[in-house]
Each structure stands twice: as structure tokens, then as C-alpha cells.
Image (cartoon, rainbow, N blue to C red):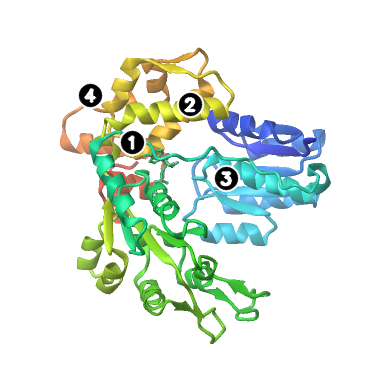
Amino acid sequence: MGKSGNVLVVEKDKNVLKWIVGMLEDHVKKVITAETPCQIPKMLKQTTIDVVVLPFSCKGDCIEIEAGIKVLHFLLRANPEAKVVFMVSPDDLSSAVKLMKEGAVDVISNRFEHKELVNRVLSCLDDVNPQNNGGQPLIFKPPEKKFVYHSNKMKEVVRTIEKVAPSEANVLILGENGTGKELVANSIHRKSKRSDNVFMSVDVGAFNESLFENELFGHKKGAYTDASNDKAGRFELADGGTLFLDEIGNLNISVQAKLLTVLEKREVTRIGDNHPIAVDIRLVSATNKSLGQLVEAGEFRTDLLYRLNTVELVLPPLRERQEDIPILVSYFLSMYCALYRKPLLKIDKSAVKCMQNYDWPGNVRELQHVIEKSVILAEGNKLTKEELCQRTLLEDSKDISFSSYNLEDVEREVINKVLRLKSGNLTHTADVLGLTRASLYRRLRKYQL
Ligand SMILES: Nc1ncnc2c1ncn2[C@@H]1O[C@H](COP(=O)(O)OP(=O)(O)OP(=O)(O)O)[C@@H](O)[C@H]1O
């Protein structure tokens, strides 16, 4: 199959850039890179660019909305057929909408899984040059996901999955970010009677009230200005299968009432329509929050909680099941060495030990990213403790020491450390620190961070 298309990727972080280029090179004719948008005009003079990938954020290293729109217009003037894909913060829906209105072809979360970005770029190129692919969509196949564990705690979880999967019971999965909640939801589906039907995953926390209804219930043509076609919602699309509602603890209270009605009646009505449609779904939901506490605070409906948690499954954080680390490390090593076509890397025993001593605030997802990064950047055939520490904050873990033990200094240093660990993402930083976003803001102001 001939490769087609020139892709320009703008990215400041050299490691991320290297990764994206490595992935795209196999599929497209040419990948051109730039560290900042200022370099774009020069590059456009040298070559025709089909797809541009640009970072966007309200602050920090990326470009701001007005500048983003300017760059977008500039690119479209230079090549009206160019496809511009922006990477934005998932919290920043209004910028995403603005950029799409101004002509961006796609907007993707800057907390993307890299494979998602590659897929989106390939699908843009598919639009540009379908004949080059013999009509076949270009699909980057992500590695198959396995559920790997060794600890007694996870063996217990798996025993519960085996028991609950064949039933029709609604399941609520609890656990910190990155502990494998979606993987478990998927495994429940695959072991259920519905496994031949769809597994539909919805991040409910990502929607405000109107988007939520539109996304979950669908709409009738003409229901509002932009509704140019009938659209089925996710409930309808999941009919006969499993609907996975992720981040259920982030659902605002007015939307909770609507969700409860659908779950009770087992039917949805598209916006602008008055014919209810029966839906047959098995519901699995997940959250990293304590729904009990939210109920006490009046932020979560008790009746909805009882609908969701017929069976509750708790995934322990990785720091409480260090026995899983060696097997997860070798699983991710073989997965990424195969993916990046590298010989299987060995790993020092001391490096594994060091990983077992780390707290893994981002849990298995963080471990997976550390191994992926290490495979990409590895030069020899062995991963050493030093190499791993260089690329992560592992060395800061258990043997934590501070320049001063004054409590305020310690607090400042810890917040700083987690901010770095979470790449400046305030929601994730607050989660790790066990603070609300408001308390985190207060401390950021206090310490001028
Ligand atoms: N036991 C495991 N074996 C193999 N891979 C795992 C395991 N647990 C988690 N992972 C991997 O870690 C990553 C994060 O898992 P997943 O998305 O299921 O977590 P999550 O708890 O749903 O996270 P979030 O709360 O942020 O949505 C995924 O790539 C998943 O495949």
C-alpha cells in the first residue's frame, strides 16, 4: 500500500514529538516537525502540507485561542484543503467549539492516548487521498489489551468479575485514576451474554447538561439550529449491549435526574421527539470519587446510586499491590518492544525494585507510560534503574527528602512535585493531593506557584 500525505507536527516536548513521528512515519509519506507555530510559514514555503497537528491551551507552552485562530486562518489561506487538528485540554470545550467553527477539522484531547492522535491523522489523510489507500480506511491497530495481575487482591477482583459478568446486574467500579476500571468494565462485557453486541463507553463527566442529553439521548432533525439530521444517542446505539458510564461521580445533579428516569423506564426519547424508544442495556459505571461522600454532601442522588451499585467492585491502587508490578512491567515491555519493533529489552532487578518502592499516583496508566517512554528512548538492550529514574520522578518516591522541614515549605514542595508529575493539570493534581480544586487554587495563590 503506497504511503501518502505530508504531516506537520508542532510539539515542544522532544520526547512526545519523537514518539508521534515514529508512529506516523510508517503510514504517511513525510512527517515534518516544528517546535513552535512561528516556524510554520517557513515550512509552508518548502513543501505542501496536508495535515497539521497543533497544541493549544489557555496558558503555558501552547498557543492561546486568538493566536490559535490566527495560525488556523494562515494555514487555510496557504492551503484551503489543509486539515488542521488541534490538541486541546478536555476541560476547554468552548475553545474546541470555536476552533472547529473557524475551520479546524478535528480537536483532540491533549491528554490523548497517542494511538488516538495517529488514528485521527490517518483518517484526515484518508479524506485527502482516498485513492492512495485502495479505498481501505487506514487504521493504526492498537495493541490488544490484556488484564494482567498476580496479587491476591486482584485475584479476588477477578473472582468477583467471573461471578458477576454472566448476570445482568448493574456494576459500579470504584478506584483511583488509571487502576484499570475501563479494562474491568470491558472484561465484564466480554464474559457476559451480551459479548456479541456493542460495548459503548461514555465519559459522562465530559458533558454539560445540553451536550449530555444530545449525546446520550440523540435528537430529531430540526430539534435545534444545528440539528440537520436525526441522530441516535449512545443509549440507543448500545441497545442489546453494555453501556459503560465512566466518571459517573462528575455528573451534575440535574443530569442525574434525567439519567435516573431513563434507567427506570428503560426507554429514551430523542430531543425534539415525543416517541419513547425502548432500550435494552446492561449498565456498568465507574468513578474515582466516593459516591457515599457525594451523597452526604447532597451532590449525588441516593436513588441513582442504588440503581448503579447492585454490585460494587473496588480496584486497589497499584501502591497497595506491588506484587503486580514485575508482571505488568514485563507485559508492557513485550507489548511496546513489539509495537516499536525493538528487540525485547531486559530490565535490571534493582530497577524493578525501585518501581515497587514508588507510589504510582497515576497507577497502572503511569507505569505503562513510563515503560513506553523507556522503550522508545532506550539505546542499549537493557533498562537500568538510572535510565528509568531519569525519565520519571521515581527517584523522588519513598526516600522523599525536603530542603526544609518547615510544614509550609514541605507543602509547597509537594504541590510543586505533583504539579510536575501531572504536567500542570490542576484536576489531576488536586485528585492526587486529595484536595478540591478550590483548595488547590488557594494554595497555588498562597505559594505563588
Ligand atoms: N491489570 C492490568 N493489566 C494490563 N493493563 C492494565 C491493567 N490495569 C490497567 N491497565 C492499563 O492501564 C491503562 C489505564 O487503565 P483504564 O483506562 O482501564 O483505567 P481507569 O481506572 O478507567 O482510568 P480513569 O479513571 O483515568 O478513566 C490502560 O491502558 C489499561 O489497559
Q: Is the CB of mark 1 within 8 Å of ligand 1?
A: yes
Dot 4: what SS? loop
Q: Which of 55 and 234 is in front in this view?
A: 234
Q: Of tags 3 and 4, which is closer to the observer?
A: 3
**Amino acid tagged 1:** Tyr
Q: Which of marks 3 and 2 is nearer the N terminus?
A: 3
- Is 80 placed left or right of 168 in the picture? right
Measured Cα–Cα span from mark 1 to mark 4: 27 Å
Measured Cα–Cα span from mark 3 to mark 4: 36 Å
Depicted 216 relative to depicted 60: above or below: below
Measured Cα–Cα span from mark 1 to mark 3: 26 Å
Measured Cα–Cα span from mark 2 to mark 1: 15 Å
Dot 2: what SS? helix
Q: Earlier in the sequence, mark 1 or mark 4?
A: 1
Q: Of tags 1 and 4, which is closer to the observer?
A: 1
List the residue tagged with mark 1: 149
Q: Nearer the viewer, residue 252 or 45?
A: 252
List the residue tagged with mark 2: 334
Residue at position x 64%, y 59% from top? 100
Q: Of tags 1 and 3, which is closer to the observer?
A: 1
Quarter that holds the N terminus: top right
List the residue tagged with mark 3: 116
Farthest residue in the left direction?
406
Dot 1: what SS? loop
What's the mark number on residue 399?
4
- Answer whether labels 2 and 1 touch (C-beta < 8 Å): no
**Amino acid tagged 3:** Glu
Q: Is the CB of mark 2 within 8 Å of ligand 1?
A: no
Query: Callout 3 environment at 10 Å: few (<14), some (14 to 19), or many (20+)?
Result: some
Q: Is residue 299 visible?
A: no
